[in-house]
Amino acid sequence: MTVQLVTGEFSKLETLNMITQMFEMRIKFHEDKIMSSHNEEDIKMREKKIKFLQGELAQARTYLVSKEDPIAVLCTITI
């Protein structure tokens, strides 16, 4: 199953806000799992994922700054 989550053209600021919120949601998911975990390996794995997501968000921000408005966004989720 594929769900169209976002489709359209947006300003840089709107695009950055959407992407930031999506990354923050994923980061919070892992933070919540860390808070409820007692397994050190699981915690380290999730901390690594959080750092990766933070790096990806930083790259996305850098990319968006170099682009002109409007920005075409297509975001799908495949289940």
Image: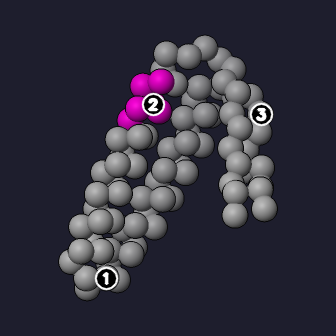
Q: Say which residue label 2 marks.
A: 61
Could you tell me which secondary element the residue under label 2 belongs to? helix
Q: Say which residue label 1 marks.
A: 37
Could you tell me which secondary element the residue under label 1 belongs to? loop
Q: Say which residue label 3 marks.
A: 8
Q: Dividing the image into 4 quarters, which one contains the N terminus? A: bottom right
| Magenta region, main secondary structure | helix
Q: Is residue 62 magenta?
A: yes
- Gap between marks 3 and 2, in whole Å? 19 Å
Q: Judge the density around disc 1: few (<14), some (14-19), many (≥20) Cα neighbours within 10 Å.
A: few
Q: Residue at x 35, y 48 (%)?
A: 52
Q: Amino acid at mark 3?
A: Gly
- Sooner in the amino-acid sequence: mark 2 or mark 1: 1
- Sooner in the amino-acid sequence: mark 3 or mark 2: 3
In front: 51, or 24? 51
In front: 65, or 73? 73
Residue 40 vertical position relative to residue 26 in the rendered view, above or below: below
Q: Position of residue 17 (x, y in %)?
A: 56, 40
Q: Amino acid at mark 1?
A: Ser
- Sooner in the amino-acid sequence: mark 1 or mark 3: 3
Q: Judge the density around disc 3: few (<14), some (14-19), many (≥20) Cα neighbours within 10 Å.
A: few
- Gap between marks 2 and 1, in whole Å? 31 Å
Residue 33 vertical position relative to residue 75 in the rendered view, above or below: below
Boundaries of the magenta span? 58-63
Residue 42 vertical position relative to residue 78 in the rendered view, above or below: below
Q: Amino acid at mark 2?
A: Arg
Q: Judge the density around disc 2: few (<14), some (14-19), many (≥20) Cα neighbours within 10 Å.
A: some
Could you tell me which secondary element the residue under label 3 belongs to? strand
Q: Is residue 13 magenta?
A: no
Q: Position of residue 37 (x, y in %)?
A: 31, 82
- Gap between marks 1 and 3, in whole Å? 39 Å
